[in-house]
Amino acid sequence: MRIRALGVIGVVGIVGASLAGCSAGGSSAAPATESGERTITVAYQKTSAFHQLDDLFQKVKPEFEAANPGVTVKLQPIESENDYFTKLALMNGSPDTAPDVMYEDSFQIRSDAAAGYLLPLDDYVNGWADWSQFYDAAKQAGYGDDGKTYGVSMGTDTRAIYFNKQIFAAAGLPADWQPKTWNDIISAAQKIKAAEPDVIPLNIYGGKAAAEQTSMQGLEMLLYGTGSTLYNTDSQKWVTGSAGMTDALKFYKDIYADGVATPLDLALDSTIGSRVSTELLPQGKLAMAIDGSWLPGGWSEGKNAWPAWETTIGLAKMPTQDGGDPGFTSMSGGWTLAVGAQSKHPRTAFDFVAMALNQENTLKYDTENSQIAVRKDVATSDAYLSYNPTFSFFSDLVQYTHFRPTTPDYSQISSALQAATESVITGQATPEDAAATYDDAVTKIVGKNAVEQGN
């Protein structure tokens, strides 16, 4: 599970030196270099389907320690798919357990900065020569409400439809399939169900167990294709009562009523995300998956390597509801590395971040994890562009993409979205009732003055 809130990076659609523990580049404003025996802890997510960040840190740790005598880097992987945020928050709750460096989802930046968990990095990045390599929109991903920088972007992503070309052929569907409307997706799923009854026709995440996957790869991929939005950035108000929300929930109702969606025992399993990428798609048990651009990163190498994916998997853009302009939609997310506000060695912690995100290491991470690069010297390099045949496809989706609100309330509202989808797919509520319950939840979370009526 990987996600984010950057502004659109137009140049990415077509598309340094390590600090080695020294000062970040010579600015007189940069905090002083630290010395002596010291230990920094690095907290991050690791799952069976997401090992690429652990791979990166296992490389950087000995390099950083060798370049910084007296420093010990303690890696603290949180091996969890859906409660990473909860466990990280618990660590940040005490100075004794708060990490020095943390893997921070960009949508959490504002709330965690406001909570006092994150250290402002402006004095560090302003003296870092590599900072000029980051696209401006990528820099904005790390901003807090006060306009200060609290995280350094690792890359971004987009979302689309993966489909199994062999299963499609058996159902009489073309290898270059591209739906123009939601009905085209449902029609394809119905044909697959008739031709291959043992195959799950379509996975779109729904329910609380899938957490943010439900919000971003699921409901928001639908909602933003209706012309509706979660949040009006102009009025700075949350949208309630929109027809788009009801229509998005009706899509869930329709695919479950037709029996073409992921069975509930799987859909409500907290490991559904990793099962889609490591089991259901590779084993030919799933025909279509609305998912993120990072999936091929897990198929290229490692214990979940799937050499046949390049000839088996097709890619299609997610259409808008009825094919209205601009025709397609996507969602983008992304993660950062941040320094903990309670760190006793903030200079050393930032220097670790800088080494982990230098040109060499960013290229390693962005290629192996199928990230859309946010460093100019990576995004335009031949090594990056030639690494994965999907990079061009997913980078092109930036022109259609949308971004989650980055307000501190978003995580609570995301939970309300997940509850709404679960109530529909389990038959506990109609789309209309689920939408009304969601509206009530949003109003309670942000207050009546912070909501407006949608259309």
Image: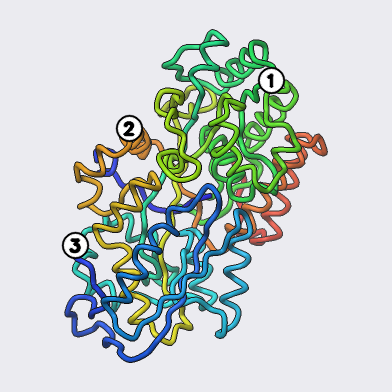
Three-letter residue code for mark 2: Pro
Give the left or right position of residue 372, taking residue 42 as reference: left
Three-letter residue code for mark 1: Asp
Q: Is residue 210 above or below residue 159?
A: below
Q: Position of residue 404 (x, y in %)?
A: 50, 50
Q: Is residue 185 above or below residue 78?
A: above
Residue at the extreme right: 428
Give the quadrant of the C terminus.
Answer: top right
Residue 16's disc number: 3
Mark 3 crowdedness (10 Å alpha carbons): few <14, some 14-19, many ≥20: some
- Viewer can see residue 435: no
Q: Earlier in the sequence, mark 3 or mark 1?
A: 3
Q: Secondary structure at mark 2?
A: loop
Q: Earlier in the sequence, mark 1 or mark 2?
A: 1
Q: Position of residue 398 (x, y in %)?
A: 36, 40
Residue 389's disc number: 2
Q: Position of residue 178 (x, y in %)?
A: 45, 19
Mark 1 crowdedness (10 Å alpha carbons): few <14, some 14-19, many ≥20: few
- Location of mark 1 (residue): 198
Give the left or right position of residue 416, taking residue 72 as reference: right
Q: Secondary structure at mark 1?
A: loop
| Badge 1 vs badge 2, beta-carbon distance below 8 Å | no
